[in-house]
Amino acid sequence: MKNHILLGKLLLNAFKILVKAQNDIESDLKDFKFINELETDFKNTNFKESFKKNFFTLLIIAILLESRVSKKHIISYAKIVIYLRQIVTSTDNIIDSENKGLIFIKNLNNNIVSNSLLMLICQNFLTKECIELNEGKDTAVKKIFDKIYLIAVSESLRDKSQYSEYPIEKYILEKIHTGIGGELLKISLEAPLVIEDSIKLKEYSSGIFEIGMALQALDDFFDIEEDERSGKVNLLKSTLLYNKKDEEIVKEEYLKKVSENAYNGFKILEDNEFPIDKKEAKKVLKKLFELRGLKEYVSILD
């Protein structure tokens, strides 16, 4: 019960930081002459709604708060999280011909042009925040872009056409999911990891990496048919291909392993005094399963 209350308070404080960061971003966007063509969809009307839509953003901010990063930096760190989220989403939009995100350009009907411009806008603001935080140095910016390159390499390895045989599970985890899973979630902590002197933050980043790996494996379960249609390598597909057990048994074992990996990540957070235990972690995973249409597999979390 104590962890439940502490986690709730921490996430509520994170929500307040997120709203301030979102308001700052909307103010920054007003400097553009084409501000009337820009619109945001931050879904921050209330904590409950934001919790559903922005849980992992709130978790990252909560980790920053619990790590005792500089109070004068916390809003900028939250803005960096938002900018990175939009850059990643815009990249996905170009790859998958989608129109998701937090910031939109209304009258640009070309998906590639619109998302390319949004990435440039967000990269400009992200660079500005990092350099100001790092007292004029570009160390944090370079670290973030090193990670973006790593993520890009992993994404490029998803193209199934480059393989003569379907990649095995170990290859997918080490070469693909490390980038598009673990590093993708952890990248939001790269700037504070450079700027802040916090041992606890370093430990938390390890937990976030493990959670990111589990989330990508869960996405592969949900997206197996879509990935097959688009010619992308998929972890569940590989697991099914090289396993002779009944398909439903393989799927259940796969999800059990995913949940165990996620629990391991949350355990790293708990071991370093973040107020989340297995009971709270289970609630998070249950909600993720339900949001991804996997309600019938929730019992695996027990």
Image (cartoon, rainbow, N blue to C red):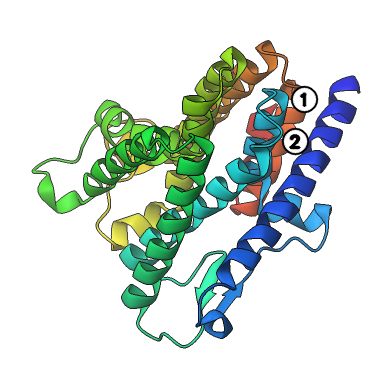
Which residue in the structure is indicated by mark 2? 283
SS class, disc 1: helix
Displayed quadrant of residue 264: top right
Picture coordinates of residue 119, whole percent (x, y): 39, 62
Look at the picture and state if 160 lies above or below 175. Answer: below
Tell me whether the residue at label 1 lies in contact with that at label 2, contact meaning CB atoms closer than 8 angstroms: yes
Residue at image x 69%, y 17%? Answer: 270
Displayed quadrant of residue 256: top right
Question: What whole-number distance in Å separates the C-alpha atoms at marks 1 and 2?
Answer: 7 Å
Instruction: Mark 2: give few (<14), some (14-19) or many (20+) Cα within 10 Å.
Output: few
Which residue in the structure is indicated by mark 1? 279
Residue at image x 66%, y 13%? Answer: 272
Three-letter amino acid code at the position of disc 2: Lys
Residue at image x 57%, y 28%? Answer: 262
Residue 170 visible? The answer is yes
Picture coordinates of residue 59, whole percent (x, y): 67, 37
